[in-house]
Image (cartoon, grey):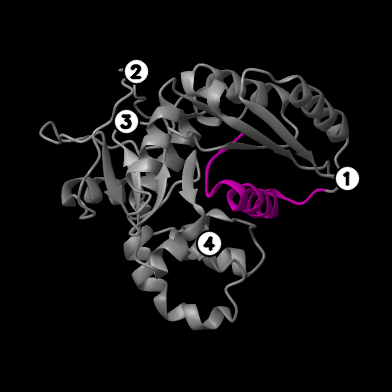
Amino acid sequence: MQYAPIIIFAFNRPKALRNVVCSLLQNTEARESDLYIFVDGARLHKDGELKEVELVREYVISITGFKTLHYTFSEVNKGLGASIIDGVSEVINRYGKVIVLEDDLCVQPNFLAFMNQGLKYYEKVNGVFSICGYNNKIKIPKDYKADAYIYNRSSSWGWATWKDRWDTIDWKLEPFDIYKSKARVFRCWAGSDAWKMLNDWHKGKNNSWAIRFVFAQFLQNKKCVNPCYSLINNRGFDGQGTNCKSWSRFKFELESTGKKNFVWPTQLSINSCLFKRAMWYNSVFIRIYSRIMYLIK
Protein backbone atom coordinates (compact mmCIF):
# COMPACT_ATOMS: atom_id res chain seq x y z
CA MET A 1 0.00 0.00 0.00
CA GLN A 2 1.19 3.51 -0.81
CA TYR A 3 0.73 5.44 2.42
CA ALA A 4 -0.73 8.93 2.48
CA PRO A 5 1.54 11.76 3.62
CA ILE A 6 1.01 12.99 7.16
CA ILE A 7 0.69 16.71 7.86
CA ILE A 8 1.09 18.23 11.32
CA PHE A 9 0.25 21.87 11.98
CA ALA A 10 2.24 23.32 14.87
CA PHE A 11 2.76 26.68 16.50
CA ASN A 12 4.17 27.46 19.93
CA ARG A 13 3.93 24.22 21.93
CA PRO A 14 7.14 22.17 21.66
CA LYS A 15 6.03 19.58 24.23
CA ALA A 16 2.68 19.04 22.50
CA LEU A 17 4.36 18.60 19.13
CA ARG A 18 6.82 16.10 20.59
CA ASN A 19 3.91 14.12 22.03
CA VAL A 20 2.03 13.81 18.75
CA VAL A 21 5.19 12.86 16.86
CA CYS A 22 6.08 10.22 19.45
CA SER A 23 2.57 8.78 19.24
CA LEU A 24 2.82 8.60 15.44
CA LEU A 25 6.11 6.73 15.72
CA GLN A 26 4.27 3.99 17.63
CA ASN A 27 2.52 3.25 14.32
CA THR A 28 4.54 0.80 12.21
CA GLU A 29 3.40 2.64 9.06
CA ALA A 30 5.24 5.80 10.13
CA ARG A 31 8.60 4.64 8.79
CA GLU A 32 7.05 4.36 5.31
CA SER A 33 5.17 7.67 5.52
CA ASP A 34 6.25 11.14 4.41
CA LEU A 35 5.86 13.72 7.18
CA TYR A 36 5.14 17.40 6.52
CA ILE A 37 5.15 19.93 9.36
CA PHE A 38 3.95 23.51 9.03
CA VAL A 39 4.92 25.83 11.87
CA ASP A 40 3.13 29.17 12.07
CA GLY A 41 4.99 32.38 12.93
CA ALA A 42 4.90 34.09 16.31
CA ARG A 43 2.46 36.89 17.07
CA LEU A 44 4.32 40.15 17.61
CA HIS A 45 2.29 41.25 20.64
CA LYS A 46 2.75 38.01 22.63
CA ASP A 47 5.67 38.14 25.05
CA GLY A 48 7.78 34.99 25.03
CA GLU A 49 5.98 33.43 22.09
CA LEU A 50 8.88 33.83 19.67
CA LYS A 51 11.09 31.75 21.97
CA GLU A 52 8.50 28.95 22.08
CA VAL A 53 8.13 29.00 18.29
CA GLU A 54 11.91 28.77 17.96
CA LEU A 55 11.95 25.75 20.28
CA VAL A 56 9.31 24.12 18.08
CA ARG A 57 11.44 24.75 15.00
CA GLU A 58 14.53 23.31 16.66
CA TYR A 59 12.65 20.15 17.52
CA VAL A 60 11.14 19.81 14.03
CA ILE A 61 14.58 19.79 12.42
CA SER A 62 15.65 16.92 14.70
CA ILE A 63 12.73 14.56 13.93
CA THR A 64 13.62 11.12 12.58
CA GLY A 65 11.78 7.85 12.05
CA PHE A 66 9.67 8.73 9.02
CA LYS A 67 10.31 7.98 5.35
CA THR A 68 11.00 11.65 4.66
CA LEU A 69 10.71 14.88 6.63
CA HIS A 70 9.60 18.20 5.13
CA TYR A 71 8.95 21.39 7.06
CA THR A 72 7.83 24.94 6.42
CA PHE A 73 8.41 27.75 8.91
CA SER A 74 6.21 30.80 8.37
CA GLU A 75 7.83 34.16 9.07
CA VAL A 76 4.44 35.72 9.83
CA ASN A 77 1.50 34.59 11.91
CA LYS A 78 -1.04 33.31 9.39
CA GLY A 79 -3.48 31.83 11.90
CA LEU A 80 -4.62 28.22 11.97
CA GLY A 81 -7.31 28.57 9.31
CA ALA A 82 -5.04 29.98 6.61
CA SER A 83 -2.19 27.67 7.62
CA ILE A 84 -4.32 24.56 7.19
CA ILE A 85 -5.92 25.62 3.91
CA ASP A 86 -2.56 26.57 2.38
CA GLY A 87 -0.64 23.60 3.80
CA VAL A 88 -3.16 20.93 2.88
CA SER A 89 -3.54 22.39 -0.61
CA GLU A 90 0.22 22.26 -1.15
CA VAL A 91 0.63 18.64 -0.09
CA ILE A 92 -2.60 17.23 -1.51
CA ASN A 93 -1.78 18.70 -4.93
CA ARG A 94 1.35 16.57 -4.93
CA TYR A 95 0.03 13.31 -3.46
CA GLY A 96 -3.72 13.33 -4.11
CA LYS A 97 -4.54 12.48 -0.49
CA VAL A 98 -3.48 13.54 3.01
CA ILE A 99 -3.75 12.67 6.70
CA VAL A 100 -3.95 15.79 8.88
CA LEU A 101 -3.21 16.38 12.57
CA GLU A 102 -2.76 19.34 14.87
CA ASP A 103 -0.22 19.44 17.66
CA ASP A 104 -2.63 19.03 20.58
CA LEU A 105 -3.52 15.48 19.54
CA CYS A 106 -2.09 12.05 20.24
CA VAL A 107 -2.92 8.99 18.17
CA GLN A 108 -3.33 5.30 18.88
CA PRO A 109 -0.78 2.78 17.47
CA ASN A 110 -3.28 1.69 14.79
CA PHE A 111 -4.32 5.19 13.73
CA LEU A 112 -2.31 5.19 10.49
CA ALA A 113 -3.57 1.71 9.57
CA PHE A 114 -7.16 2.88 9.96
CA MET A 115 -6.68 6.10 8.03
CA ASN A 116 -4.78 4.56 5.14
CA GLN A 117 -7.17 1.64 4.80
CA GLY A 118 -10.11 4.04 4.86
CA LEU A 119 -8.53 6.24 2.20
CA LYS A 120 -8.02 3.21 -0.03
CA TYR A 121 -11.44 1.64 0.60
CA TYR A 122 -13.43 4.81 -0.14
CA GLU A 123 -11.12 6.41 -2.71
CA LYS A 124 -13.56 5.81 -5.57
CA VAL A 125 -16.67 6.31 -3.44
CA ASN A 126 -17.42 9.93 -4.21
CA GLY A 127 -20.13 10.12 -1.56
CA VAL A 128 -17.49 9.98 1.20
CA PHE A 129 -15.89 13.35 1.93
CA SER A 130 -13.43 12.38 4.67
CA ILE A 131 -12.09 9.70 7.00
CA CYS A 132 -11.98 10.72 10.67
CA GLY A 133 -9.91 9.31 13.50
CA TYR A 134 -12.11 10.65 16.30
CA ASN A 135 -15.43 9.35 17.54
CA ASN A 136 -18.00 11.02 19.75
CA LYS A 137 -18.62 9.57 23.19
CA ILE A 138 -21.45 7.33 22.01
CA LYS A 139 -22.34 3.74 22.81
CA ILE A 140 -21.97 1.34 19.90
CA PRO A 141 -24.77 -1.28 19.67
CA LYS A 142 -23.57 -4.80 20.47
CA ASP A 143 -24.91 -6.15 17.18
CA TYR A 144 -23.05 -3.55 15.07
CA LYS A 145 -20.42 -5.49 13.10
CA ALA A 146 -18.27 -2.88 11.35
CA ASP A 147 -15.32 -1.02 12.90
CA ALA A 148 -16.53 2.32 11.56
CA TYR A 149 -19.82 4.04 10.80
CA ILE A 150 -21.16 6.61 8.36
CA TYR A 151 -21.97 10.06 9.72
CA ASN A 152 -22.72 13.55 8.42
CA ARG A 153 -20.30 15.87 10.20
CA SER A 154 -16.55 15.54 9.75
CA SER A 155 -14.24 16.03 12.71
CA SER A 156 -11.11 18.19 12.64
CA TRP A 157 -9.38 15.99 15.25
CA GLY A 158 -7.30 13.78 12.98
CA TRP A 159 -8.78 13.40 9.53
CA ALA A 160 -7.99 12.50 5.94
CA THR A 161 -9.35 13.33 2.52
CA TRP A 162 -8.61 13.25 -1.20
CA LYS A 163 -7.71 16.01 -3.66
CA ASP A 164 -10.90 15.68 -5.72
CA ARG A 165 -13.01 16.32 -2.60
CA TRP A 166 -10.76 19.08 -1.22
CA ASP A 167 -10.86 20.97 -4.51
CA THR A 168 -14.65 21.32 -4.34
CA ILE A 169 -14.59 23.51 -1.20
CA ASP A 170 -15.48 27.19 -1.54
CA TRP A 171 -13.54 28.81 1.30
CA LYS A 172 -14.86 32.34 0.65
CA LEU A 173 -18.61 31.58 0.54
CA GLU A 174 -19.44 34.80 -1.28
CA PRO A 175 -22.03 36.22 -1.28
CA PHE A 176 -22.83 34.76 2.13
CA ASP A 177 -26.47 35.88 2.12
CA ILE A 178 -27.42 33.19 -0.39
CA TYR A 179 -26.68 30.52 2.22
CA LYS A 180 -28.78 31.94 5.06
CA SER A 181 -31.88 30.09 3.90
CA LYS A 182 -30.04 26.83 4.60
CA ALA A 183 -29.43 27.60 8.29
CA ARG A 184 -32.20 25.41 9.73
CA VAL A 185 -31.42 22.42 7.52
CA PHE A 186 -27.71 22.75 8.26
CA ARG A 187 -28.39 22.67 12.00
CA CYS A 188 -30.49 19.52 11.61
CA TRP A 189 -27.84 17.92 9.42
CA ALA A 190 -24.68 18.82 11.36
CA GLY A 191 -25.76 19.77 14.89
CA SER A 192 -27.32 22.65 16.77
CA ASP A 193 -24.04 24.59 16.96
CA ALA A 194 -23.16 24.34 13.27
CA TRP A 195 -24.86 27.40 11.78
CA LYS A 196 -23.75 29.67 14.61
CA MET A 197 -20.13 28.63 14.04
CA LEU A 198 -20.41 29.34 10.33
CA ASN A 199 -22.18 32.65 10.87
CA ASP A 200 -19.57 33.67 13.46
CA TRP A 201 -16.85 32.92 10.90
CA HIS A 202 -18.62 35.20 8.41
CA LYS A 203 -18.76 37.96 11.05
CA GLY A 204 -15.05 37.58 11.78
CA LYS A 205 -15.58 36.12 15.25
CA ASN A 206 -13.62 32.97 14.42
CA ASN A 207 -11.32 31.80 11.65
CA SER A 208 -12.54 28.21 11.53
CA TRP A 209 -11.55 26.30 8.43
CA ALA A 210 -13.32 23.22 9.84
CA ILE A 211 -16.86 24.61 9.78
CA ARG A 212 -16.39 25.65 6.16
CA PHE A 213 -15.16 22.12 5.40
CA VAL A 214 -18.30 20.70 7.03
CA PHE A 215 -20.53 23.19 5.19
CA ALA A 216 -19.05 22.13 1.86
CA GLN A 217 -19.76 18.53 2.84
CA PHE A 218 -23.34 19.50 3.69
CA LEU A 219 -23.91 21.36 0.42
CA GLN A 220 -22.83 18.24 -1.49
CA ASN A 221 -24.65 15.84 0.87
CA LYS A 222 -21.52 13.77 1.41
CA LYS A 223 -20.56 11.69 4.40
CA CYS A 224 -17.61 11.05 6.68
CA VAL A 225 -16.44 7.73 8.10
CA ASN A 226 -15.84 7.59 11.87
CA PRO A 227 -14.21 4.80 13.89
CA CYS A 228 -16.46 3.08 16.42
CA TYR A 229 -13.84 3.80 19.09
CA SER A 230 -11.66 6.87 18.92
CA LEU A 231 -8.12 6.61 17.61
CA ILE A 232 -7.44 10.19 18.67
CA ASN A 233 -6.91 11.69 22.10
CA ASN A 234 -7.01 15.46 22.52
CA ARG A 235 -4.58 16.19 25.34
CA GLY A 236 -6.40 19.40 26.13
CA PHE A 237 -9.22 17.28 27.53
CA ASP A 238 -7.43 14.28 29.08
CA GLY A 239 -6.69 15.86 32.44
CA GLN A 240 -3.16 16.93 31.52
CA GLY A 241 -3.97 20.32 30.01
CA THR A 242 -3.56 23.34 32.25
CA ASN A 243 -7.16 24.42 31.68
CA CYS A 244 -8.64 20.94 31.92
CA LYS A 245 -10.84 19.87 34.81
CA SER A 246 -11.87 16.40 35.95
CA TRP A 247 -15.08 16.28 33.87
CA SER A 248 -15.39 16.82 30.15
CA ARG A 249 -17.76 15.59 27.46
CA PHE A 250 -14.66 15.21 25.30
CA LYS A 251 -13.38 12.30 27.38
CA PHE A 252 -14.21 9.18 25.40
CA GLU A 253 -13.34 5.52 25.02
CA LEU A 254 -10.17 4.96 23.00
CA GLU A 255 -9.70 2.04 20.63
CA SER A 256 -7.53 -0.37 22.64
CA THR A 257 -7.57 -3.68 20.77
CA GLY A 258 -4.64 -2.74 18.53
CA LYS A 259 -6.35 -4.31 15.52
CA LYS A 260 -4.79 -3.45 12.16
CA ASN A 261 -7.39 -4.83 9.73
CA PHE A 262 -10.74 -3.08 9.80
CA VAL A 263 -14.25 -3.92 8.66
CA TRP A 264 -15.79 -1.01 6.75
CA PRO A 265 -19.43 -0.11 6.12
CA THR A 266 -20.26 -1.16 2.57
CA GLN A 267 -23.26 1.16 2.25
CA LEU A 268 -23.38 4.93 2.77
CA SER A 269 -26.70 4.75 4.57
CA ILE A 270 -26.60 6.18 8.09
CA ASN A 271 -27.34 3.88 11.02
CA SER A 272 -30.30 5.62 12.69
CA CYS A 273 -29.33 4.51 16.20
CA LEU A 274 -25.76 5.80 15.89
CA PHE A 275 -26.91 9.01 14.21
CA LYS A 276 -29.36 9.81 17.02
CA ARG A 277 -26.72 9.14 19.66
CA ALA A 278 -24.13 11.30 17.89
CA MET A 279 -26.58 14.17 17.37
CA TRP A 280 -27.68 13.97 21.02
CA TYR A 281 -24.04 14.24 22.03
CA ASN A 282 -23.85 17.56 20.12
CA SER A 283 -27.24 18.83 21.26
CA VAL A 284 -27.88 22.10 23.10
CA PHE A 285 -28.83 20.17 26.24
CA ILE A 286 -25.58 18.20 26.38
CA ARG A 287 -23.48 21.29 25.63
CA ILE A 288 -25.18 23.23 28.45
CA TYR A 289 -24.88 20.27 30.81
CA SER A 290 -21.22 19.94 29.87
CA ARG A 291 -20.59 23.58 30.64
CA ILE A 292 -22.28 23.33 34.05
CA MET A 293 -20.35 20.19 34.97
CA TYR A 294 -17.11 21.82 33.87
CA LEU A 295 -17.74 24.77 36.17
CA ILE A 296 -18.68 22.78 39.27
CA LYS A 297 -16.20 19.89 39.09
Mark 1 secondary-structure assignment: loop
Q: Which residue is mark 1?
A: 45
N-terminal-most mark, 1 or 2: 1
Q: Vertical placement of 221 versus 56: above or below?
A: below
Q: Vertical placement of 219 versus 60: above or below?
A: below
Residue drawn 59% across the image and 18% down it: 22
Residue 253 visible? The answer is: yes
Horizontal and vertical percent position of residue 78 = 77, 51
Evaluate if marks 1 and 2 touch, with contact meaning CB atoms under 8 Å apart: no
Q: Which residue is mark 4?
A: 212
Mark 2 secondary-structure assignment: loop
Q: Amino acid at mark 3?
A: Tyr
Q: Which residue is mark 3?
A: 229
Residue drawn 38% across the image and 42% down it: 120
Horizontal and vertical percent position of residue 280 = 28, 49
N-terminal-most mark, 3 or 1: 1
Pick the front one: 95 or 107: 95
Q: Residues within 10 Å of mark 1 (few under 14, many from 20)?
A: few
Q: Which residue is mark 2?
A: 258
Q: Which segment did they paint magenta?
A: 77-104
Q: Quadrant of the N terminus?
A: top left
Q: Amino acid at mark 1?
A: His
Residue 232: quarter of image: top left
